[in-house]
Amino acid sequence: MAVIGIDEGASKTAGILLAEGRIEGRVRLRTDTSSSQAVLAGLLAACSHLMNEAASRRIEVSGIGVGVAGFIDFEAGVVTDAPNQPLHDFPIRDLLAREVGKPVCVDNDANLAALAEARLGAGKDSRYLIHLTLGTGIGGGIALDGRLYRGALGSAGEFGHIIIVEGGPQCNSGHHGCLEALASGTALYRRVEELAAGGVESAMTEDFLKNPESFTAGDICRHADSNDSFAIDILAEAGKHLGSGIATLVNIFNPDVVTLSGGLLECFHYMEGEMRRAYEENAIPISRRHARILTTALGDDGGQWGAAILAAEGG
Ligand SMILES: [Zn+2]
């Protein structure tokens, strides 16, 4: 028996075929977000690819798990809203199940990353785990004794939207000063844009102005590597906000571990110092001394592993 785990994000859709705990096939597609039907077609294409892979090896697929970057009503299998995709009250679980003829489970992508980290990643020896995904946005998940805490409507763990600086910059969901608006890839990009618009001259702003569309958080990291002090400061400041956010979570949850994943980890060494400083300053001692902050043990695959675990357990 095998399962399929798919991590669907606004830019890419990646999936694994998992049989007897081993990855037997992979798929990776650019996500077409032109319409909800296009998103569904992309998921179907990813599933078909992996089901063909399974068929060619005479492995039977028992179910499919999908992680979606958005707000998910887990019980209903509906994407209620997704900040960067045209999905509103979209019954993605049932639509996909009808197309593929297999049971489908759908959850938030960061929840599934948390589940994977708790079961077989950096937090596998822990009982109380908090996970943060640091990418274009900031997502979160809560895994207690290896099971997800989802809340009444499935939207628990939206750590990207805890307020760090009241009246601060705005996020895509409309809040001001939330963690996502201060420390996500999007937030970092906006800081560079602000500096460039304000006439700050550095190799980084020059690079940004040459081609703003293709500039990414990875470029900020590159400029930090060449000692651009603006790049170093932007990353350190994001690290400080992240540390304050983690302190708040540790004060609330008293976790064993806080695990971090996502594309921004490539810049993490520039963020970590200020992150740990702000964390030390703001977390209460009893919780702070116990909790470990760890980076993912699953690379970019956490969401896919989590989706596969969900599928294997039938939700
Ligand atoms: Zn927000």
Image: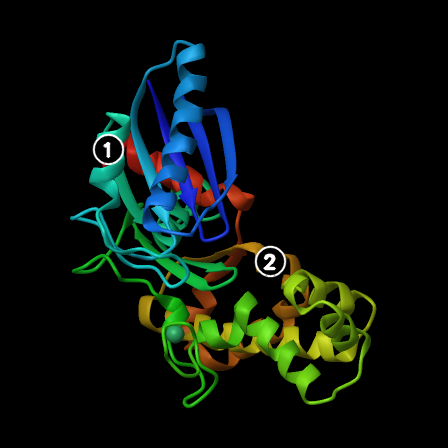
Where's the N terminus, which quadrant? top left
Q: Is there CB contact under 8 Å for labels 1 and 2?
A: no
The spot of residue 117 in percent (x, y) is: 43, 46
Residue 13 at least partly seen: yes
The reply to whether the residue tagged 1 has its Cβ within 8 angstroms of ligand 1 is no
> Which label sits in the foreground, 1 or 2?
1
Position of residue 227 in the picture relative to residue 262 (left or right): right
Three-letter code, disc 2? Leu
At x 54% / y 69%, what residue is drawn? 186
Q: Secondary structure at mark 1?
A: helix
- Residue 44 occupies quadrant: top left
Q: Is residue 18 visible?
A: no
Q: Which mark is residue 265?
A: 2
140 or 79: nearer the viewer: 79
| Callout 1 amino acid | Ala
Q: CA distance from mark 1 to mark 2?
A: 34 Å
Percent x, y for residue 231? 72, 74
- In the figure, residue 55 lies in which quadrant? top left
Question: In the depicted view, which residue is nearer to us: 254 or 171?
Answer: 171
- Residue 140 horizontal/vertical position (percent): 39, 60
Q: Residue at x 59, y 72 (%)?
A: 188
**Disc 1: which residue:** 97
